[in-house]
Image (spheres, rainbow, N blue to C red):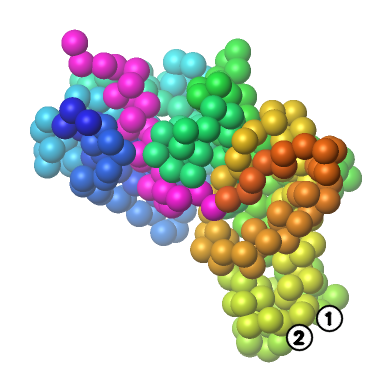
Amino acid sequence: MTGRVGIGLDIGGTKVLGAVVDDAGAVVDEHRVPSPTGEWRGSGSSQGLFDAIVATVTELRARQPEVTTVGIGAAGMVDLDGAIHYAPNVPAFRSTPVRADVEAAIGLPTVVDNDANVAAYAEARFGAARDMSDAMVITLGTGIGGGVVIGGKVLRGAHGFAAEVGHFQIDPHGPMCACGERGHWEAMASGTALGVMARAAAHRGELATVVTAVGGDPDAVHGPDISTAGRAGDAEALAVIDAYAVNVAIGLVGLANIFDPGVIAIAGGLVNDGELFLGPIRKHFIGHIEGATYRPVPEIVPATLGERAGVIGAAILAMDQHPVA
Ligand SMILES: [Zn+2]
């Protein structure tokens, strides 16, 4: 470590999280702009989001004047010049030259990449995929984000749009995805999808204990209620978790058959429940991966950097791409 520090931002549909990160991956300062109503998601206003980005960088730079770079991880399809073309869950981003606009407003070298790519970069440098040349980092949240590390580098593709794993089609007749196609992996295996599956089970008359616990309305059942009941050993909740784990595992198997990762790190809130989700996911993954008994099977482990993976990876990526002379 040289003592160098840079700014990292993680931008999603409902918040901007900013941090000052040192070149050993430690967060030394933090600033968060919450948007609890999800205003960027609803309004489609890129100006409000851009203002929040600039305000966050300006605040952090005032507190830590020695920063020399800005890295941004943003949801959606980010091209190789840091323009965001399309983000299903953030309508504020449509053909928006975020890198160029932020760099012009701030005056510091700026790098923009997909949020899942920068999270994968962080996990590969400092977290669960450290020292692995080939790995996948999959975030199960509102949607599904993925980063694929090949030969120590994050796969970007010809245009920057590689590893949009959430929009990998699992079932052409499956539920509608935020992007307008059916049966994409994130429509079937995101944290959001867990809640959808739970409410469907409740409407079928299953999950009686969970429905009672939330006041009797099947539509009031959400993912965390399933986790709580699952931890208590409720058989019907465990059945929903198992069905959900099948959907997660099917996508992981397809990707692992293509990329042959040494390790698959899973990020997202359900990782906090340890083996409650990871156990069934691992079981179904091993049950379906090609040649399971004749090969080393990729390990499925929890990601270790938590919600700060994005800011850490974005900051480190910007410092790596703009070394000090
Ligand atoms: Zn989709």
> Which residues, given as a range, are shown in magenta?
302-325
Residue 176 or 118: which is nearer the viewer?
118
Label disc, if present, on residue 205 of the rendered structure? 1
Residue 15 or 3: which is nearer the viewer?
3
Residue shown at the point (36%, 23%) measured from the top left: 111
212 lies above or below 194? below
How packed mark 1 is, by other alpha carbons closer than 10 Å (few <14, some 14-19, many 20 or more), is: few
Residue 116 or 324: which is nearer the viewer?
324
Q: Is residue 233 left or right of residue 284?
A: left
Residue shown at the point (42%, 48%) measured from the top left: 305
**Circle 2 SS class:** helix
Residue type at mark 2? Ala
Q: Is residue 259 visible?
A: yes
**Magenta includes 307?**
yes
Label disc, if present, on residue 208 of the rendered structure? 2
157 lies above or below 48? above
